[in-house]
Image (cartoon, helix red, strand yellow):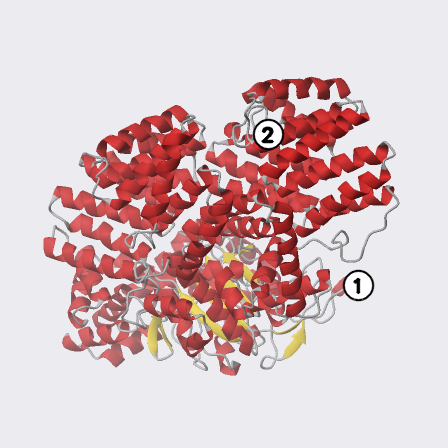
Amino acid sequence: MPAKVITAPPPRTCCVAVRSGPAERAGATVAPGGGRSRPIPVSLPTAPAHLGCEVMSAPGPPLHDLPPGEPPTGSDPVASGRSLGPAGVVGRDGELQRIAEVLADAAAGRCSTLLLEGDPGVGKTTLLEAARAMATGFTCLTARGAESDSSLAHAGLLELCSPVRDLLSDLAPVQAEALTAALGWSDLPSVADRFLVAAATMSLLAAAAERGPVLVLVDDLQWLDRESAAALTFAARRLGPDAVAFVATTRPGGSHPDLTRGLALLPVVGLATPAVASLLPPGTASAVVEDLRERTGGNPLALLAVAEGLDDAQRVGAAPLPDPLPAGDRVGELHRATISGLSPAASEAALLLAVAGRTSDAAAAVATVLTTSGVDVADALDEARDRGVLAAVSGRPEFRHPLLRSAVLSLAPPSRIRAAHRALAGALPAGDRSRTWHRAYAVTGPDASLATELAAVAEADRDRLGHAAASAALERASELTPDRDLAAHRLAGATHDAFVAGDVARVRVLAGRLLSGTTPEEARGEALLVLGTLEQYAGSVPLAVEHLEDASQLLRGAMLVRSLTELAMARFRLNDVAGLVACATRVDEVVDPGDPEQQLQAHFVGGVASVLTGHPEEGLPRLAEVRRLADEPRLRHDAGALLLMALAVAFTGEMGDAVTVGTARMQDVRRRGAIGVLVPLLAISAAGRAWVGDHTGAFADSGEAAELAAHLGYAADASVAVEMLAWQQAARGSHEEARTSLARARELTDRAGTTPHAAHQALTAAFCALCRGDLAEVVALLEPRLALDGGVGASGEPLGVAPLLVEAYLGLGRVADARALTDRYAAATPAVAPPLSTALLQRCRALTLEDPAAATAAFEAALAAHEAALDPFETARTRLLHGGRLRRSGQRVAAREQLELARSAFTSMDLTHWATVASQELAGTGATARRGDGSGDAPLTSQETRVSLLAAQGLSNREIGAALFLSPKTVERHLSNVFRKRGFRSRTELAAAWAAQASSASTSTS
């Protein structure tokens, strides 16, 4: 069916038909063919796209377009999917429909995102303009990427946030401080993490949405500075029931694929033949229309440019079409022809604008340069506008399309471009970052003074959390530095800044440059250290070992100690204890006794090595020293020191301390928004909480760690958190969610190269299978571990798979196998074993004994050992199995005692699945379930759990949102779900319930 042009009076509210097939016409209220439709109230672009802002109440200029009400002039109109006549967008019904749905979601209070991806000239910017025109009642916030500004930290974010700067007071103070420092609204350097800027961006957009729906428009995302792109994509993922819509454009293979991965993507391709016909002059022969569509790929920009140059004979097919046609990159040839026709004055104005960028001082600097050169600024800009090269946007001249800017630069020889940069630098004030960059682009050879100035710019960018910008400045400084060693050192610094910015691809490129030539050893070592650290946390752990080992052969001093510490951790992940011990020996040989940071690292590596090799009398004092050093003033706020301290506590087995020590320190980490270190800290905390029976806290911490790790692209650390999340979900009866988490954990360990060493993963998967009653799966998962590594447990304990596997064998009727495995387990467990191992061994014996009295004695021995083990969950599981055995042997009264204790414990831990199982066993004894025993409660999600825990502490929605990097609306939604699932009527009831549960859990533990 031919696509129809949208023609009508000015925009009005109407309904879009949402159905499985495309609507006949954007703006249709009835779906043809009898399809059922769902009305969505939005405003469609029924006027020319360049008039869209005329009826907008929202702030923000149109994108690459004419000012409100200005008619098209000149012979080269913008060709990006807009018709030549007074009509609107053509041939984009499907795209407009998707945009309408995104806007409707936002209007209904649901954050929604759409990424428009397509080649230059295909009409992406026109669709953004259409989105603006459709967004009646929305506040429109705009950020536009430009190649010249991509190295200026937070340039896009500054443009986007400025219209809502008045809402800063609605943010948590620490977030407001981070954002004002990053955007240059404050002269104070930021002491926060870069992710706090992203969290502040999310909070600012959420605050704006409180006043009404918000539309965020981002054009040319591939050229947006990385800091801004990271902040906006973070906000798009973390906002929930917030009236915010994100619509962005990018080119295939854009420069931020890691940031946009997973966002809703809509490819924008060439127009179909009916739409092509509507763009061409009336009377164009159908054969010519089809030929043009095929030869241009349906690219609207190319089509409009070609149509302007066709004569009457060519339109009707009486004369051949020009060859070649401007398809794809050849569209630029037409633009170059247009630009070549400009007068020298207008050409100079265009070139200056092309290299000036879009900073606030750029237009003024261009005018100054032109005036100084004797050019009439108004005449030059008017000519460029008349020729269709420029347009006035909010009183500033801008290119009507990015390809026009590219064409200007491609026509100018390098010497002329350098001269333009030099002239602009002279027109900008001293101290302006743009001035330094223009000077850097203007020179061709080494310039030690300018390189030093760029290094200072990098330092200033770093203070404003602009690590990507700092990396770019140091890279250029390296290129301008005549001293070979200093140049390599600066390039190594650029590599490290790229790592901190999370730009994995750039890290690999810069490190590759350092490693490919005759780079000094120290700089090579620094590059290898960064690469190794990157691989350890976000890539392949075996590859991390290679890089870190090489780095340790090249570095000296503090950097050597740091590389050996990272290498030790990587080897631990691969169960390479001998390699870890070798690292400890080397660290002790080179550590500086006067450097607290090096001492902390040395004690950590040495302490872990001693504990793992069976020498706790040597290792535990060293790990205690780690805790002492981490509390020294110099290291108290150091993220790396905090992480090693938490790991040290975990290695001592004092998991309760890991919780109490970590909780206070993590509050500071949250305040600074240091998400990178927060992920492993939360994973450690989750393990500690689970160990002491705080499964509510473990569920909250593991879920948060898993979510934040996804933003960072972590692998090894993320997998541990995701496994714990799966365990907690299964224990609550959320089996499908647990399956999803397990699959993700496997993907992460595969990526990290640690799957063969992840005994804990098989045990977690087997536990999840046990929870859903799939005993055959338990066997299928754990039997192979017997051949692979002897069936060790999650902490390396001998035959740690036995307790789950014995249960599965018995449930499947494989009694002989269960008894044989119990005998093996007994032989593998030392006489003086940890209390938990003793308890689990006795439980296996009890399950496999035929004699009821002997089984009862074994269960009682298991429970006695549990008292020293202090693992409330396993204690409750033993009581559940004991009570079941007593019930089946007819001892109902004794069974009820054990089952009541088990149910109470499971309920206090908020493990709803196991509470239900215990209630079912109790029902078999003739007991009735008591109201409030927890067995009928609907399980909460991890995010609901952590929100409700903070609410129980008396925090407001805004304070909870700031702590968890969520919007207040998201917090409100989660609390509503908690109240509905648990029947709470007030926060007081919620707080009382969590307090009672915590008290019960504490009683169970003691």
Residue 89 in sight here? no
Image quadrant where residue 44 sits: bottom right
Left or right, 111 with respect to 773, comes to: left
Label 1, on which residue?
A: 34
Callout 2: SS: helix
Characterize the local packing of mark 1: few (<14), some (14-19) or many (20 or more) Cα atoms within 10 angstroms.
few
Residue 411 in sight here? yes
Residue 822, above or below 22: above
Left or right, 891 with respect to 95, comes to: right
For marks 2 and 1, give the one nearer the viewer. 2
Image quadrant where residue 968 sits: bottom right
Characterize the local packing of mark 2: few (<14), some (14-19) or many (20 or more) Cα atoms within 10 angstroms.
many
The amino acid sitting under disc 2 is Ser
Label 2, on which residue?
A: 837
| Label total for image | 2
Estimate the x, y position of residue 910 in percent, counting from the top left: 67, 51
Say which quadrant the N terminus sits in: bottom right
Q: Earlier in the sequence, mark 2 or mark 1?
A: 1
Task: Tell me the residue at 32%/26% (across/down).
Answer: 582
Estimate the x, y position of residue 60 in percent, counting from the top left: 44, 76
Task: Tell me the residue at 74%/55% (across/down).
Answer: 937
The amino acid sitting under disc 1 is Gly
Residue 135 versus residue 771: which sits nearer the camera? 771
Residue 556, above or below 377: above
Estimate the x, y position of residue 150 in percent, counting from the top left: 33, 59
Residue 132, above or below 963: below
Task: Tell me the residue at 47%/32% (across/down).
Answer: 753
Callout 1: SS: helix
Image quadrant where residue 892 sits: top right
Task: Tell me the residue at 59%/29% (across/down).
Answer: 837
